[in-house]
Structures are given as C-alpha cells and as structure tokens.
Image: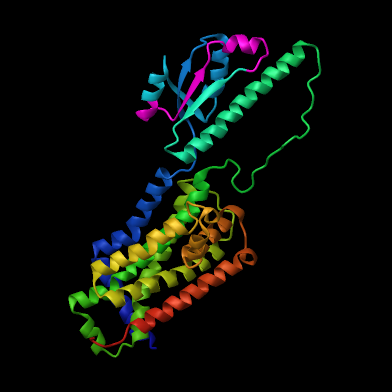
Amino acid sequence: MKLTRLAAVSKKEFLQISRDARSLAMGIAMPVVLLVLFGYALSLDVDRVPLVVWDQSRTQASRDFLSLFQGSRYFSIGQYAGDYRGLERAINAGKAIGALVIRYDFAREVAAGRPTAVQLILDGSDSNTATITLGYAQAVVRGYSQGLTVDAVMRSGGTVPNPPIDLRPRVWFNENMESKNYIIPGLISIIMMIIAALLTSLTLAREWERGTMEQLISTPVKSAELILGKLLPYFAIAMFDVLIAVVMGYFVFGVPFRGNVILLSVIASVFLVGTLSLGILISARTKNQLAASQFALVLTFLPSFLLSGYVYPIANMPRPIQLVTYVVPATYLTKIMRGIYLKGVGLHVVWFDALLLVFFSAVMVALAAASFRKKLT
C-alpha cells in the first residue's frame, strides 16, 4: 500500500464531497437536524397531565383536595364537567388524559373521618402514560390521606406514630430523572450508525453509475487503497459529527458529561470504522445509489432505533428478540455512551462492550475489502 496513491484517492473523494451539496447536507446538517428533532420531540417524561374534573361536592374540602393536583408539576386541571358525558367528550377529544370524579358527600365523609371514594378515569389507549399517571395520582391521594390522619390524631391529643419504615430515596447519575439525559447519549450512537452507513453507501455505487469506476480500475490503485482512500474523508466528517453532537448535548440540551473525552473519541472512532465499512460493503454489492441508500437505512435505522435499548429496554423484550439485539452494534455503543456520559465509567467497566465493537469493525472491514475486486463484472 502506497501512501501517495491513498492520499490521491482521499483527495479525490474530498473534492467530490465538497462539490456535492447533498452529501455535505447529509454529512453535517442531518445530524444536527436529527439531534434537534429527537432531542426536543422525543421525551419519556410525563408532566402536566391534563385532567377534567367533575366536582359533585363543590365544597372547601373538595377544593383543597383538587389543589394538591393543581399544585403538582405532574397534573394540570384543564376543565370541569357537570356529568359523565362531559368527561367522556373531553377524553375522546384528547383534551384530557384522566378524569376525577368527587362524590357529593366527600366533605361530610372526610369531616367524619370515614373512608370516601374518589373515582379516577384514565385514557388507556396510551398504556404507558396511563400507568405513570395512575402512580402519580396514587401518590397525591396518599399524601392527602396521610395529612388527614395526622390532623385527626393531633386534634384528639394523641401522638403521631413514626412510620415503621422510613424510605429515603436517592437517585444517582440522573438526579432529576430527566429523560433527555437518558435519550441524548443514546441518540448520538443512533445518529452515528445511520449517518456513517448512509454516507459511504453511495461512494462506490456513485462511481459505477457515473462510469468512472472503469477509470479507477485501470489505474495502479489497489483495492485496499481505494477502499481506505474513500473511507478516510467520511471518517473525518463522521468524527466532526460526533464533536457537534457532544457539544450540542452539553450546551444545548444540558446533558452532563462526566466521562473521559479521549475514551469516548477512541470508542466512537472504532465504531465509525465498522459502520463506514458497512456502507462500503452495501455500496459494493448494490452498485446503485438508490438501492444502496435504502439498504443502508433498513440495516441501520430500524435495528438501531428499535433493538439497541435506546428507547425500549432490552430486558422487557421477548427472549427471541433479545437474542437478535446481540448482533446490533448500536446496542453496545448506546450502553457505552450512557455509561461514559452519565456515570463517568472508564475502560475497566466498558471493556467487554468495546471489545465487541472492535470485533464488529474488524469483520466489516474484512467484508468490505473482500466485496470489492478490480474487475468490471
């Protein structure tokens, strides 16, 4: 392998990219757009759940009870109804996710110290939001009930008993439990997987479609020099994308970065070599830009988004699907990125996942080199 020939191929590819606005947009603008789009649009937080209320009691006691929901960051009382039809209309129209029904005898039963029922109706079409909303509502009601119990005991002159178990929760790594801190590091790995494969999937296919591959084949440039020469410019662009993503994650989304920048850069470069080689492999096999881009999108976006643990926990997937996730390289990078970003872990913790990425990259490079031969067939 001669460095002069390698540099010539890389220079040619750099010039090609600089003259192709579509490739530049895909390589630089698209990661920024995806980060902004997914970073702001995709959220697992359930806040300000809209509620519709039918207060049959209309007393100070019922208003005090509702004030706990109104004062919570998790709920927002949007409207009131006078019957079940009004509740149904609000939920069907999507104006409310839940409905509270307070009975007419609420104040009397509370004043007498007797149990009283409050009905909570939830829109179960979104089961995840309904489950989380139910937990929030139970916590509010539990706090209200405990307050009534304490007041009753103190009025009677008794002593409020200490709870047998005093739970003191403490959250590590994501103290405010914000979903963006969980999403952004994983999103960076997904973007790296998609963009890198899409970029290089067009390289060899473009040469075949434009008829310039025959000229390249006739030159003394070897197959390995051609593959590596075409890979290097896109590697530089992809690493620049990683830098943009990390900077945006920290300054735009406020995601803490507690790990080692050098470790992240090395692991990202290993992963990018594999995904760029995957794109080269697709391009060499299809010899058509449209087919290559479609194959690259199917082989990267869907598995990375659905099976990497980025959004859906792998442990909750059926066992056969869990086995499939082991062959998705983004699974390991997502785990590493979250560990480095939020936990500040080092190589002694992520070494096994990093080793699997090295294996992935080595296999992809070998397959990409074997897929291209300097022949016209």
Measured as percent of width and height from the top left, residue 318 is found at 51, 57
Closer to the camera in the image, 23 or 111? 111
Q: Which residue, as the protein is rendered here, is positioned at the far left?
A: 211
- From this view, report whether residue 153 is shown above or below residue 333: above
Instruction: Classify residue 36 as left or right of residue 254.
Output: left
In this view of the protein, can residue 364 be seen by the observer? yes
Give coordinates of residue 48: x percent, y percent.
47, 30
Q: Position of residue 190 (x, y in %)?
A: 43, 58
Instruction: Based on the picture, tell me whether residue 292 belongs to the magenta stretch.
Output: no
Residue 144 picture location, percent across and down = 63, 22
Residue 6 shows in the view: no
Residue at image point 25% right, 87% down? 217
- Residue drawn at (59%, 26%), measured in percent from left and top? 140
**Residue 78 sits in which quadrant?**
top left
Within the image, what quadrant is residue 204 found in? bottom left
Q: Is residue 165 left or right of residue 136?
A: right
- The quarter of the rendered structure image containing the N terminus is bottom left
Rendered position, 367 above or below 154: below
Q: Which residues are magenta?
A: 90-115
Q: Nearer the viewer, residue 97 or 36?
A: 97
Q: Quadrant of the C terminus?
A: bottom left
Residue 97 falls inside the magenta stretch: yes
